[in-house]
Image (spheres, grey):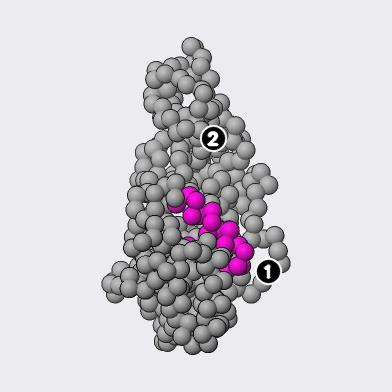
Amino acid sequence: MTTESHPTPADTNGLDSQADLSAPAAPILELRSVSCAYDPHRPAIRDISFSAREGEILCLLGPSGCGKTTVLRAIAGFEPVRSGEIFLSGRRVSSSSDTIPTEERHVGMVFQEYALFPHLRVVGNIAFGLGHLSRSDRENRVQEMLRLTGLEGFERRYPHELSGGQQQRVALARALVQNPVVLLLDEPFSNLDPDMAGHMRQEIHTLLRRMKTTTILVTHDHDEAFAMADRIAVLNQGVLEQIDAPELIYHVPATPFVADFVGQADFIPGRIEQRLVHTELGQFPDTLNCSEGTVVVMMIRPDDIHILPNPSATSRVVARQFRGSENLYAVRLGSGLIVHSSESSTAVYQEGTAVEVRVTATHTVLFNPPSSNAAGQPPPGPDKRD
């Protein structure tokens, strides 16, 4: 298990966490070595520890079944913890011996299906749970949320009369109107088409920033996590593998799983000689301080690799994916190893083109090769599908 500290290779090219720009403050949410299990013999999450400060947007990222929704349910009080502790605003709300009920935790939650009441209009859905307020206070709070979420004019509509994006806004308004200590978002954009999801991500990000709402977002989509989060916690098989700023998660992953899950990654075998990593693509700094002769694996991203046509080169283009703003090329090196290169959308090379491969990596990320893998083969890739 990794802690909240990030790896410190020799050259991170000035990358730094956004969360470190201000002086440390007491966390709003804190998990200390939390484990949960549906099956007594198979924990769903194991020894999870992290914290979130006021106004921070923290994303739990990982494939289906990795435990991210279990973490969210434990924070909400829906799932008891087998071991460890959960604190909200300094108050212990979960431990193996006692659990504070969900309704006393002051958390807001937006579910994947939104869970709106079909028999209530928009105002009724938003006002649900505000019965303890006077009528005037309740109306003022609801009107404020209608304005903040852009729902003015939709007050009298029922959920079935709204679009998916409008339904999501109602669910968000219903959660935020309670002034929650922490807002929990469980795959909130998964039911929207890609264009609408992108639009709603920007709207909600702006709203959460304006309200300074501490938020825990669960997603399997690394692009969504990069767009929304101040920090990202990557989970794999119930274990927290890394928690860091999005830039560090992408450029300086702590494990091969993280490297492969958050974007296209190639793994190049190398050997340490004279304090350098010698690979088929050239020589790079030894950021692990390995002994002479040690075999390592270097991670490299498509944006670090550039190709130029060269009839005398031994590398060949074997595939091209057009992605609008870029072309993603698969290139077979002389050894047979496949690497990927991100090029301009106007740089079009046909399959079979001989190309020279140039590496412009600004930092080196090295891993010890898995003993079960043959040299030159990448670590097992995670399932990136939901």
Where residue 9 appears, as percent x and y from the top left, is: 61, 48
Most common SS among magenta residues: helix
Where residue 312 appears, as percent x and y from the top left, is: 49, 12
| Magenta stretch, residue numbers | 197-218
* Residue 53 located left or right of residue 309: right
Of residues 4 and 268, the one drawn nearer to the viewer in this rendering: 4
Residue bearing the label numbered 2: 303
In the displayed image of the protein, which residue is found farthest to the top? Answer: 311
Question: At x 71% / y 67%, what residue is drawn?
Answer: 23
- What's the amino acid at mark 2? Asp
- What's the amino acid at mark 1? Pro
Residue 312 has which mark? none
Magenta stretch contains residue 290: no
Quarter-wise, where is residue 144 in the image? bottom right
- Relative to 378, residue 216 above or below: below
How far apart marks 1 and 2 lie (CA) works out to 34 Å
Q: Tell me if mark 2 has few (under 14), some (14-19) or many (20+) residues whose alpha carbon lies within 10 angstroms of its own.
A: some
Q: Tell me if mark 1 has few (under 14), some (14-19) or many (20+) residues whose alpha carbon lies within 10 angstroms of its own.
A: few
Where residue 157 appears, as percent x and y from the top left, is: 40, 66
* Residue 13 located left or right of residue 307: right
Of residues 213 and 73, the one drawn nearer to the viewer in this rendering: 213
